[in-house]
Image (cartoon, rainbow, N blue to C red):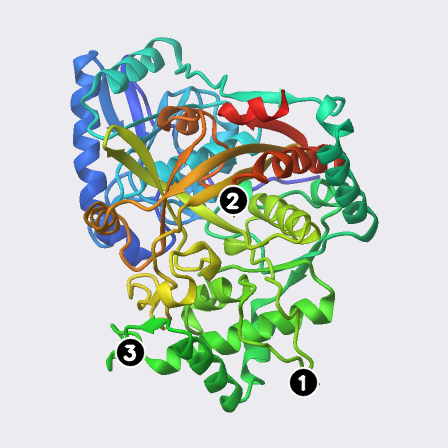
């Protein structure tokens, strides 16, 4: 006779009429949660007052922990336990004012029956908008419907209209017709540029573009962790590598080689803001360790025959060595310290090694594709991802602030290597320090893209844009409003406004590659054809659709 014994399930948290539960999802790192808690608390108060305007009452789905000093959910177990106490039909607002680890709550939200609103603040210092985009994409990848809303103040007409709509209908409808489907039978494939893209794609499908990732799944990004089948179908299988193996390989790099690497960049004009206190300042030994990491990464690329490489970026490594940022940006640049393998042969001389930052497979797809296409055309082929970090109006135009945590190819900066400054990564996130590659993104035209998955289907948004060098004072204002230590690219996306991207983008990231203005239309056509040939569903964003007509 079978005897069942399970822990007692809690009584579901009761939700009254016109009562809304609020969930505060946070970071895995307690240092970030305690630092950001006052901002979350302030926006919870704003939301409480907004709900009261419509006759609703806000109720926290989980208490503030006085011992930990914040009210964020900070791990997946905690999130699952909290949702086990929630009425599955209750209306839920996930209030996002910080970066958050989506996997803390996304699996539970996927099973929740009630309406879900992802609500974000829109500001630079506290990037709820980045967290919202990541959570939205994660729920989309899991097939869970949700609504999204964003506001700078939680006291504007756009915000009130959206909140009222969700309270009434359980949804907020935004226009996403800036995205246009492109069928595999589109005439662009048969055109001259399209045929180039088709040939490149067929090469990749035949030979495979192997993506080497040190410990995939970073920072809770379910949307950045693609099913194996999805990557295999498009000719981009994953080589799963271990960050512990990376640390072992780093130890093998001689001190003299590390010193030669750092000196190479200093001689070419990069500025490092060195200090003496390694706990709060950048020190030379931190950058030497980053040089060892770059050399080790390149050796893995050669050893495994990879087309690109990515490091998980924080968890694990941050508690073991200096941050990966300098290594990631430098390895992705064509003008690079000549990295020798164990036998002294230089690895990939004169060519960037695509670096998949934050091991984000959704960025790996367009990065490796654009690198292969541009290299085959004899064009500069550096690529990078950026956070869709923030943006604001200057001179009547909305400019995005696109940032990556510190790793950007020098070729994407105004002044190249000589235009780069290495600041210490913030101690709050990186106890062992390490240099960023900071600077102003150079002016120019670019192609942007981002892949996501639905089931095992790979879908990619593709568009065009312009990077702009804003005046010094305005650029400085934006740096201080976000992360001063990081590289910053100001840009407009052709025919894609702020609220368009916030409504329809399926990631907190986008990938860019600079392309000469005259060549851009043909490269764009080739890239679209390349994606279609590899079995990727294409959605062209904004005005870029005109290039295909």
Query: As rendered, which of 499 and 472 lies closer to the eye?
Result: 472
- Residue with the mark numbered 2: 511
- Residue with the mark numbered 1: 344
Disc 2 crowd, CA 10 A, few/some/many (<14, 14-19, 20+): many
Foreground: disc 1 or disc 3: 1
Element on which disc 1 rests: loop
Query: As rendered, which of 276 and 189 lies closer to the eye?
Result: 189
The quarter of the displayed image where residue 355 is located: bottom right
Q: Are marks 3 and 2 in contact (CB under 8 Å)?
A: no
Residue placed at 22% from the left, 15% from the top? 157
- Residue with the mark numbered 3: 278
Query: As rendered, which of 457 and 475 lies closer to the eye?
Result: 475
Query: As rendered, which of 456 and 372 lies closer to the eye?
Result: 372
Residue placed at 43% from the left, 20% from the top? 114
Q: CA distance from mark 2 to mark 1?
A: 33 Å
Disc 1 crowd, CA 10 A, few/some/many (<14, 14-19, 20+): few
């Amino acid at each position: 006779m079978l005897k069942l014994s399970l822990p007692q399930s809690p009584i579901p948290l009761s939700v009254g009429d016109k009562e809304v539960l609020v969930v505060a999802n946070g970071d895995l790192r307690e240092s970030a949660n305690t630092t950001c808690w006052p901002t979350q608390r302030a926006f919870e108060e704003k939301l409480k007052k907004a709900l009261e305007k419509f006759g609703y009452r806000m109720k926290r789905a989980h208490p503030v922990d006085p011992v930990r000093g914040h009210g964020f959910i900070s791990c997946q177990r905690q999130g699952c336990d909290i949702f086990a106490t929630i009425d599955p039909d209750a209306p839920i607002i996930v209030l996002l004012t910080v970066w958050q680890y989506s996997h803390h709550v996304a699996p539970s939200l996927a099973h929740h029956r009630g309406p879900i609103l992802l609500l974000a603040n829109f500001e630079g210092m506290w990037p709820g908008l980045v967290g919202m985009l990541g959570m939205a994409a994660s729920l989309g990848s899991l097939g869970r419907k949700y609504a999204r809303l964003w506001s700078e103040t939680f006291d504007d007409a756009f915000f009130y209209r959206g909140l009222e709509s969700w309270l009434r209908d359980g949804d907020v409808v935004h226009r996403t017709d800036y995205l246009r489907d492109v069928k595999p039978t589109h005439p662009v494939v048969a055109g001259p540029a399209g045929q180039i893209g088709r040939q490149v794609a067929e090469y990749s499908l035949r030979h495979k573009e192997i993506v080497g990732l040190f410990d995939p799944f970073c920072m809770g990004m379910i949307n950045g962790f693609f099913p194996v089948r999805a990557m295999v179908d498009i000719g981009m299988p994953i080589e799963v590598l271990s960050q512990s193996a990376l640390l072992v390989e780093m130890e093998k790099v001689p001190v003299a080689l590390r010193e030669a690497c750092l000196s190479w960049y200093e001689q070419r004009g990069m500025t490092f803001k060195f200090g003496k206190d390694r706990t709060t300042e950048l020190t030379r030994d931190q950058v030497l360790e980053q040089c060892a990491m770059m050399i080790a990464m390149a050796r893995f690329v050669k050893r495994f025959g990879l087309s690109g490489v990515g490091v998980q970026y924080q968890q694990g490594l941050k508690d073991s060595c200096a941050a990966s940022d300098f290594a990631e940006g430098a390895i992705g640049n064509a003008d690079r310290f000549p990295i020798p393998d164990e036998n002294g042969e230089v690895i990939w001389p004169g060519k960037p090694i695509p670096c998949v930052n934050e091991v984000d497979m959704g960025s790996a797809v367009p990065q490796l594709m654009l690198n292969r296409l541009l290299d085959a055309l004899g064009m500069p082929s550096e690529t990078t991802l950026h956070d869709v970090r923030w943006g604001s109006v200057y001179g009547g135009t909305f400019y995005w602030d696109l940032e990556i945590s510190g790793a950007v190819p020098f070729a994407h900066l105004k002044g190249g290597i000589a235009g780069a400054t290495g600041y210490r990564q913030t101690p709050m996130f990186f106890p062992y320090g390490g240099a960023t590659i900071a600077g102003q993104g150079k002016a120019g035209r670019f192609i942007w893209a981002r892949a996501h998955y639905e089931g095992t289907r790979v879908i990619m948004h593709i568009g065009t844009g312009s990077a702009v060098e804003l005046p010094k004072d305005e650029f400085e204002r934006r740096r201080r409003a976000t992360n001063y230590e990081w590289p910053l690219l100001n840009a407009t996306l052709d025919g894609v406004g702020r609220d368009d991207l916030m409504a329809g983008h399926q990631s907190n990231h986008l990938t860019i590659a600079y392309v000469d203005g005259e060549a851009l239309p043909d490269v764009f056509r080739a890239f679209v054809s390349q994606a279609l040939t590899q079995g990727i569903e294409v959605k062209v964003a904004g005005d870029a659709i005109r290039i295909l007509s």
